[in-house]
Image: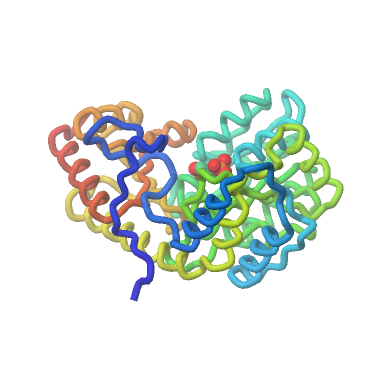
Amino acid sequence: MAKYNFDTSINRKETYSIRWDVKDGELPLNIADMDFLVMPEIEKSIKSRAEQACYGYTYVPDSYYEAYIRWWRDRHNTRLEKDWFVYSKSVVASIDSIFKHLGKPNDVVVMLTPVYNVFFNCIENNNLVLKECEFIINEEFSIDWIKLETQLRGAKFFLLCNPHNPLGRKFTIDELNKIINLCKQNNVYVISDEIHGDIDLNKGRYISILNSGVTRYDKVITLLSPSKMFNVAGLHSSVAVISNNKLKEMVQNGFWQDDIGEPNYFAIDPIITAFSYGDEYVDQLNSYLNENRTFLIEFLIKNLPNLKIVSGTYTYLVWIDISCYSKDSRLFAKRLQEATGLVVAPGINYGKSGEGYIRLNIATPRDNLIDACNRLMNYISENEEE
Ligand SMILES: Cc1ncc(COP(=O)(O)O)c(C=O)c1O
């Protein structure tokens, strides 16, 4: 019997939710947070901290890192050490700070695209030069190794999103090893953003870069966070994991200079609770998400067979090929929103190679998903060709 309930509808309007700050009747399935209740243990932990009613400066205790270490040992069979951790208030803030302190203007960053849109901002904000290595479009969206090898020559950073937002794919151990080897040959820092790590809908654990080259190559920075799987993005709690002590110190100094290395008052205990008691929650969450994904696939096959889900079973973000209806994903998303109130993310947001796709967040109660599917169907049946 499921212990946690993912069907409860939560009214997030007028709660300063970035995603739900929409017009009446609109259904936003664009931004990546979940419409599910957190596990009750997290809520209890927050309430108990709140009851102290004295919210001063907070440091990160060892028990915070020990909770990560336990999770990684039991769930991923991976040994992490306490002195590899650096606290950061967010993954994006970490990437920005790493670029700022380890890079200099005009350094090259290579990314596999389409990819999480905010990565592009981090590159631009730090006056770095982006080289996009577009996935080869096939069943798996495979890596263009020849292009990647060329682009890494002379590059400073390789920024990986693993599992991949928006494609929902994981990387195999062979792919990760190959990435590590290429980056090592070219002396390139590897930054692996693994914020979606434990959202594995089909029980196929993703493989972290920590399981591949971390001890073989000393320029790997892995970014972990509880925010996606436990729906605690608003608590601002994440870590960088770096096994090379010298690099770790450089990153830590950068985080302090940028004032992102200290937690807020609510960022510690609830996260310890999540990692200590959250296994069952995450398992049940993944099952629910998997059912949502299956529902969506079956709905599309039956009602909109020209729309194709091309993403894999990682993350709660689904990548849908809309190219037979529209080649302009921004216009498609705009008109869909105007006509039906359904808000989706246009694929072009994730790089040029994202054109012709939309991204849909399925971390919402089934009723919302059914509603979204009907809105999409009605829109398309009334606007066959754009
Ligand atoms: C790949 C990826 N990295 C980072 C973030 C944001 O992380 P944070 O809120 O910790 O900055 C997101 C949010 O959607 C994401 O998809």
Residue 188 appears anywhere in the view: yes
Residue depicted at 40% across the width and 33% down the height: 355
- Residue farthest left in this picture: 382
Horizontal relation, residue 333 to residue 189: left or right: left
Q: In the figure, residue 382 lies in which quadrant?
A: top left
* Figure check: 255 above or below 53: above
Along the viewing direction, whichever of 9 and 127 lies nearer the viewer: 9
Q: Quadrant of the N terminus?
A: bottom left
Colouring rule applied to residues: rainbow
Q: In the figure, residue 61 lies in which quadrant?
A: bottom right
Along the viewing direction, whichever of 111 and 52 lies nearer the viewer: 52
Residue depicted at 44% across the width and 36% down the height: 354
**Residue 67: x percent and y percent?**
65, 63
Horizontal relation, residue 283 to residue 11: left or right: right
Q: Quadrant of the C terminus?
A: top left
Q: In the figure, residue 38 lies in which quadrant?
A: bottom left
- Residue farthest bottom in this picture: 1
Along the viewing direction, whichever of 276 and 113 lies nearer the viewer: 276
* Figure check: 64 above or below 187: below
**Residue 133: x percent and y percent?**
58, 39
Residue depicted at 48% across the width and 49% down the height: 141
* Figure check: 290 above or below 238: below
- Residue farthest right in this picture: 246
Horizontal relation, residue 113 to residue 365: left or right: right
**Residue 266: x percent and y percent?**
58, 48
Total marks placed: 0
Residue 135 appears anywhere in the view: no
Looking at the rendering, the quadrant in which ligand 1 lies is: top right
Horizontal relation, residue 260 to residue 351: left or right: right
**Residue 122: x percent and y percent?**
61, 31
Residue depicted at 68% across the width and 55% down the height: 178
